Image (cartoon, coloured by chain):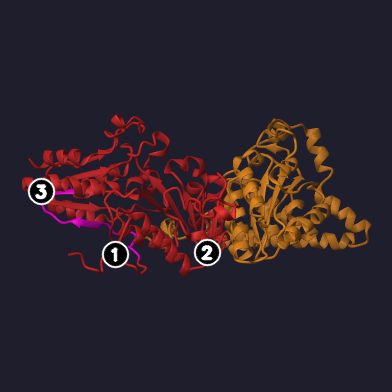
Amino acid sequence: MVSTSVRSLTYTQAVNEAFHQEFERDPSIILMGEDVAGGAGRSEFEDAWGGVFKLTGGLIGKFGPERVRDTPISENGFMGAAVGAAATGLRPIADLMFVGFVGVCGDQIFNNMSKMHYMFGGKVKLPLTVITSTGAGVGSAAQHSETLYSIFVHFPGLKCVAPSNAYNAKGLHIAAIRDDDPVIVFNNKLLMGGVGGGIHVPEDSYEFPIGKADRPKEGTDVTLIGISYTTYQCLEAAKILEPKGYSVEVIDLLSLSPLDEDAILSSVKKTRKVVIVDEDYPKCSMASELSALIAEQAFDFLDSPPIRLNAPHASVPYSPVLEEQYIPSPSKIAESALSLLE
Amino acid sequence: MYETMVLIRRFEEQAKREADSGRILGTHSAIGEEATPTGICVHLDDNDYVLGNHRSHHHCIAKGVDINEMMAELLGKVTGTNRGKGGTMHIADATKGMLGANGVVGSNIPVATGCALAAKVQGRDNVSVVFFGDGASSQGSLHEAMNLASIWSLPVLFVCENNRYAESTPFEYAIAGQSVANRAAGYGMPGVTVDGQNVIEVYEVAEEAVARARKGDGPTLIEAFTYRYHGHFGADNPLGYRTPEEQKHYKDKDCIKTMEQFLIESGTASKNKLEAIDNDAVQRVEKATQFAIESAYPDPSELLSDVYVKYP
């Protein structure tokens, strides 16, 4: 029997709730992006979209157009405006609709956002949040299906988080907004679309600490490391491995920069075998970074080298027959784990 | 305003000497361009914002940034405006509303729009001024920022210092239509052309634009024609792309000399008074240089400080 205290929210509902609660709490928070409300300038169509992925619905009605601003298609313009506004008293949230669009505003993110606090001698803070969508699997093809974690993690000065379910999504968005550094939040499309289903999300406001990984499954035989959607894939892979008698540990990274190195290393030192599952392109990816970390700091504990499962070194294809091969599947993850276990 | 222009000139001359002596790598000298920021910043206070570009020493000084701290920053000392972490192209002083020079052409223009946005959302009547060059006027960032500032009616002054060259490239080649000011009409805001070497004309144009912005009537684009006497950067010899005759033509219309003539002819100040101001500027710059030389470098541990406010 389900307890009446379980409050099941979807990923999208949880993030939306985070925004509503934070907007209520702090009047210096504003939101900018394309169609974050929708129907701009026409009162009868206000809030037409609430964001492409429905994360930001209802905000303009409650908090008004001064704080919730639809922008023209000007990523360079409004991302730069987010930097300037953050430097002068606001806590802006800027929505980069698809992570691949970073190509349009890279200057503002990589040259200003990541650097100003440092190069101004610590005398200016940029307490802003960038939310963006990631991931393949929905037929959006090459330019709208990327992941690109490592490109942002690469830059000193940026923090990066990637939620994996409704519960940590609410907590990480709240933590990101309250953080005085620029934080990039990667929201995976399949998760936003409901994969994994709803889980219990507390009604009160809470922060999930940035810099801490989660361990949704504890085990002793092999470590599977997931990021966002691939954490779900790892948990599905565990369902294939457990009936074969294996005890599987799943680490959910959640925080990409800063990285919870202790959680990763203590797991690998225990199980001695690791499969890293990262949906991003393979070269210079988060999986590469984790591999190096594990090899350097847990070398003596490993039974075999770490296995990296990424997308292939190819753009995301359109045809479903090709795209379904793109993201590492639970059976592929299980297969890799078995190659270490057997 | 005369005092400010003279101070800028003397500071920049010293900066050039520092570069020539090898003590610093070099700077993007603003000698010749003193009038434009001077005539504009007179209408601003510490709570208004100025954002600059790579050639920003004159913006900083006109906005009231301390020249001791500026010189120390050029020498990479911990007493510099940026604790030695930024250098000549990134000088910033938030206490004076100088939210930074910026080494990427056009990069600060959207940032300045954001400062204006914050002022508007928080109900303050502060104004944001961004300086950029003829080169930057081709960057998409300017167009996006002008559009945004116009649709949201933000209190921004977009000030193009057209010194006629983007590095070695003349503006007649690079700017379709030959006029930056004319682009304003396409973005629904007034566009004004002004002689950037005449500080009084700049003053008058700026007065109107700042008042507009403060009232909530939105942004203005100002194109101020000016001239840099030296190369793009320290080691650049501008005679590689312009004639000695042209240089002489513009140096003969020097903004400080022009103002000097005006002040004397109008009886506002005597030659002696102006000389005293100049001597004072020279002394202040000497003091700043001494301060910078005697200041300590940052502790090596500062290499890793201020990457984040807090990590993790």
Q: Residue at x 63, y 62 (%)?
A: B120
Local crowd at mark 2 within 10 Å, few (<14), some, or many (≥20)? some
SS assignment at label 1: loop
| Residue depth check, mark 1 versus mark 3: number of the one nearer the observer | 1
Reading the image, the residue beneath label 2 is A63
Range drawn in magenta = A207-224
Amino acid, disc 3: Glu
To which chain does the residue with label 2 belong?
A: A
Residue A111 is left or right of residue B49, and the answer is left
- Residue A71 in percent (x, y) is at 56, 50
Q: Which chain is red?
A: A
Q: Residue at x 66, y 53 (%)?
A: B57
Which numbered circle lies on residue A242? 3
Local crowd at mark 1 within 10 Å, few (<14), some, or many (≥20)? few
Q: Quadrant of the C terminus of chain A?
A: top left
Reading the image, the residue beneath label 1 is A7
Q: Nearer the viewer, residue A15 or A266?
A: A15
SS assignment at label 2: helix
Position above or below: B270 against A316: below
Residue B122 is left or right of residue A254, and the answer is right
SS assignment at label 3: helix
Q: Is residue A222 magenta?
A: yes
- Residue B145 in percent (x, y) is at 62, 48
First along the sequence among labels 1 and 3: 1
